[in-house]
Structures are given as C-alpha cells and as structure tokens.
Amino acid sequence: MNINYFFIFFSLCLLMILFLFKPMEIKQHAYKEVPLFTISTFTMHELDKNGLVTLMNGSEAARYTNRYTVKDMDYTDNSKEYMANMKANSGVYKNEVVNLSGDIVYVREDGLTFETQKAVYNKKTAIATAAGKFVLYRDANRVTGVKLKYNDALERVEAKNVYAIYKLEERKR
C-alpha cells in the first residue's frame, strides 16, 4: 500500500469528522444568587449603648451578602424621637433602607398612621415614601392621595392629589 493512500484515507476521515460531528454545545447557566443563610419565625434585636434601636420580626428571612429579604415583615425603628413600626407582606433591608411591599401599615408612637402598597423607609433620614395611593390618619383626621413623602424627624408630610378631612377644635377664651 502506498503512503499516499494512507494520507488520503486519513484526510477523508478528518473531513468526515469535521462535517459529520458537531461540537458539543456548552449550556450557560444564569448566575443565581444564593443566600448565606435562611431562617424562619425570627426576631432580630439591634442594640446600642442607649438600648433597643431596631426590632425586626418575620415568618421567613434570607441573608445575602448585602441585604436581608423578609416575609411578613414587622419592623420597628426606635432610633428617633418617636418610635415607628412598619408591617408589610415582604421587605428588603439594605444599607439602613427598608423597601416594603404589600399591605403596608406604618404606625408612629403618637398615633400617626398611613397605609399603602409600596413604601421605602430610610432609617438614617427618618423619611418614609410611598409612590402609589395612600391613606394617612391620626385620630379623626384623614388624608388620602398619591406620592407620599413623610419626614418623621421634621414631622412634615408632602403628597400629591390630596383629599383631607380635618377636625378642628375651638379654643375657649
């Protein structure tokens, strides 16, 4: 047998391999962030030299590298003049900012309350914002509107499309 036939046969085999066999497809998986740990039915206390600063309860939580995600969140901030409590179906706590969603009820120690579906509370500035519709009330006073911005430190409320019912008291002289 001639060596030329060998190389022709070898070349034909390589060409067949090239055209008949396809390279293996490598499937790429999207990166899914995995929690560092998960817990259920928990209470978290944050303390400083003056006492309790933050209290957070929930039915389930996951800790990631930069945030906590919580179901049935019950968050209390005791770091300002008035203690404020927020309850929601779910929340994300990241860099002292709490993003809440679903049936949110914000109650301040002096009775000021607002309800909405999505809200953000910044613990550093004590500002709560709600992008959608809200109902704010205290005693017999009631305010409805959209785009609420409530500054707890300054006790100032800003909103759009406001409808308010206030009960004014007369002073006797």
Image (cartoon, rainbow, N blue to C red):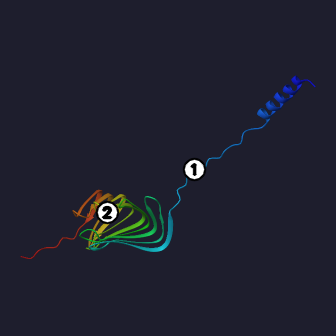
On the image, the x and y values in percent for residue 87 come to 39, 70
Which residue of the protein is positioned furthest toward the right in this rendering?
1
Q: Which residue lies furthest to the left in this view?
A: 173
Q: In which quarter of the image is residue 172?
A: bottom left
Left or right of 139, for residue 2: right
> Disc 1 vs disc 2: Cβ atoms closer than 8 Å?
no
Q: Which of 29 and 153 is in front in this view?
A: 29
Picture coordinates of residue 20, whole percent (x, y):
79, 35
In percent of width and height, residue 98 lies at 38, 62
Task: Tell me the amino acid under the disc marked 1.
Answer: Ala
Circle 2: element type: loop
Q: Which residue is drawn at 77% across and 38% down?
A: 21
Q: Name the residue beneath numbered marker 1.
A: 30
Residue 165 in the image: state x and y as whole percent.
Answer: 26, 66
Disc tally is: 2
State the quadrant of the C terminus.
Answer: bottom left
Residue 20 disc label: none
The disc placed on residue 123 is 2
Residue type of the residue flagged with mark 2: Lys
Q: Nearer the viewer, residue 8 or 98?
A: 8
Is residue 131 left or right of 2 when viewed as pictured?
left
Work out how far the residue at label 1 is from the one at label 2, CA to CA, in angstroms. Answer: 34 Å
Residue at position x 66%, y 44% from top? 26
- Quadrant for residue 104, please give it: bottom left
Describe the element under mark 1 as helix, strand or loop: loop
Q: In this view, does 158 lie above or below 166?
A: above
Q: In this view, does 21 lie to the left or right of 42?
A: right
First along the sequence among labels 1 and 2: 1
